[in-house]
Image (cartoon, rainbow, N blue to C red):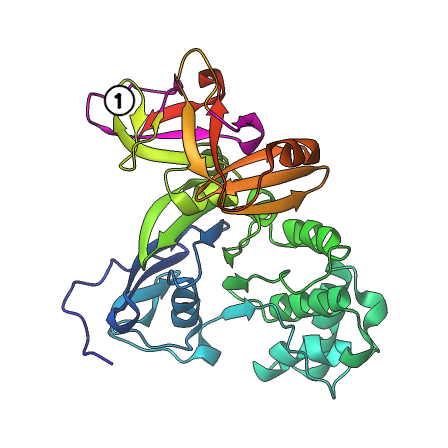
């Protein structure tokens, strides 16, 4: 591992100011700076390898970074000082609940308070409270091996909260659950996480929409976009945010439309201040607004985009036709009529009224 970076650390947050983290790990190509205000849930989004796990590991005290600084409510956890994981008042909830198999559910939840020196009776009382909060009080006397995946994850949430953490880290907590268990757990999390300081890593747009107040998008070890959840998902400025929002995005420079480096020229309705000539801009439109043609439609060529089909994915009663980073949702009849298969050259067409354009 390389030596510590010479770049100045980020400022330490003041008392009650939530999480302030600058994580610098050159060997992983990571230099990420983010903040989580008290009582705020921030979703950390990005493709695999973008640096999300490095941030979580550093904040949790599992990884010691080469540079930067981590502070929680004004207390420095990493930087000039190094606070071990058990003394950080940070709890992490991952895909695997990691419950102790030899303990009952009640004793699993009471484990955190007991480890902090709380008396057994008080710790169990606290455990019962949190089991009730996550609708799992009826499971108190069971062993983890007798629980379903959704039940085990509820117990893991109760165990994390019973430790009374100042910060809760959620690392894709619902990724391993079956479809039937996920909605109820998501609603439970929405309720118990209210007014808590939370950093959430997820690839699920519903997790992001329902749980997060704000979004930070990282790519290549850097923050590329951040803002209120609804704003980022409605008007993404990064490719990953557009993908997780289920939108097409074409980036380029303004030339009476957005002209991409690979030659696409997309016209649309300008939102906000109009871009100037040559200024960077993005065009965003939904896959369901895209029509697919075997050849370019006649008449005006505006927003007729020549593409090559790369993949077909079932999507309920529709089929998503992917062409690189772009997608169109069509019927199964259209797939058959147009003989849509990977490698086939087609034209995507979208009305300008269905496209939102804004400068970056």
In this rendering, is residue 224 above or below 349? Answer: below
Considering every residue shown, the one lying at the far bottom of the view is 102
Horizontal side of 128 relative to 84 (left or right) equals right
Quarter of image, res 13: bottom left
Reading the image, the residue beneath label 1 is: 275
Quarter of image, res 136: bottom right
Residue under the point 64% across and 69% down: 162
Q: Is mark 1 on a helix, strand or loop?
A: loop
Q: Tell me how many marks there are.
A: 1
Q: Which of 354 and 214 is in front in this view?
A: 354
Q: Position of residue 312 (x, y in %)?
A: 59, 45
Query: Residue 300 in magenta?
Result: no
Residue under the point 50% across and 55% down: 197
Q: Is residue 37 visible in the rendered structure shown here?
A: yes
Q: Which of 255 and 135 is in front in this view?
A: 255
In this rendering, is residue 262 above or below 159? Answer: above
Q: What stretch is highlighted in magenta?
A: 266-295
Query: Residue 276 in magenta?
Result: yes
């Amino acid at each position: 591992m390389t030596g510590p970076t010479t770049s100045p650390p980020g400022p330490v947050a003041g008392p009650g100011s939530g999480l302030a983290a600058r994580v610098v790990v050159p060997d992983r190509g990571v230099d990420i700076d983010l903040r989580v205000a008290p009582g705020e849930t921030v979703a950390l989004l990005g493709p695999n390898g973008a640096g999300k796990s490095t941030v979580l590991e550093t904040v949790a005290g599992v990884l010691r970074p080469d540079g930067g600084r981590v502070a929680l409510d004004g207390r420095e956890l990493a930087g000039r000082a190094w606070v071990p994981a058990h003394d950080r008042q940070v709890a992490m909830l991952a895909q695997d609940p990691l419950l102790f198999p030899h303990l009952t559910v009640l004793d699993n939840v009471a484990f955190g308070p007991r480890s902090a020196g709380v008396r057994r009776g008080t710790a169990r009382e606290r455990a019962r409270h949190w089991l009730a909060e996550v609708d799992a009080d009826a499971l108190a006397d069971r062993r983890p091996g007798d629980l379903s995946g959704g039940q085990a994850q509820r117990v893991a949430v109760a165990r994390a909260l019973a430790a009374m953490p100042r910060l809760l880290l959620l690392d894709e907590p619902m990724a391993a659950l079956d479809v039937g268990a996920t909605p109820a757990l998501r609603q439970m999390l929405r309720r118990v996480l209210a007014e808590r300081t939370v950093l959430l890593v997820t690839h699920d747009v519903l997790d992001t929409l329902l749980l997060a107040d704000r979004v930070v998008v990282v790519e290549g070890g850097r923050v590329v976009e951040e803002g209120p959840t609804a704003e980022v998902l409605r008007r993404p400025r990064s490719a990953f945010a557009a993908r997780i929002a289920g939108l097409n995005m074409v980036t380029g420079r303004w030339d009476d439309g957005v002209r991409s480096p690979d030659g696409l020229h997309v016209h649309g309705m300008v939102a906000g201040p109009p871009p100037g000539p040559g200024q960077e801009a993005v065009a965003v439109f939904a896959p369901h607004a895209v029509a697919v043609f075997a050849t370019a439609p006649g008449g005006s060529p505006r927003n007729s985009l020549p593409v090559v089909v790369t993949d077909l994915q079932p999507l309920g009663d529709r089929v998503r036709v992917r062409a690189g980073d772009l997608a169109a949702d069509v019927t199964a009849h259209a797939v058959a009529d147009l003989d849509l298969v990977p490698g086939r050259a087609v034209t995507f067409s979208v009305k300008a009224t269905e496209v939102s354009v804004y400068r970056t």
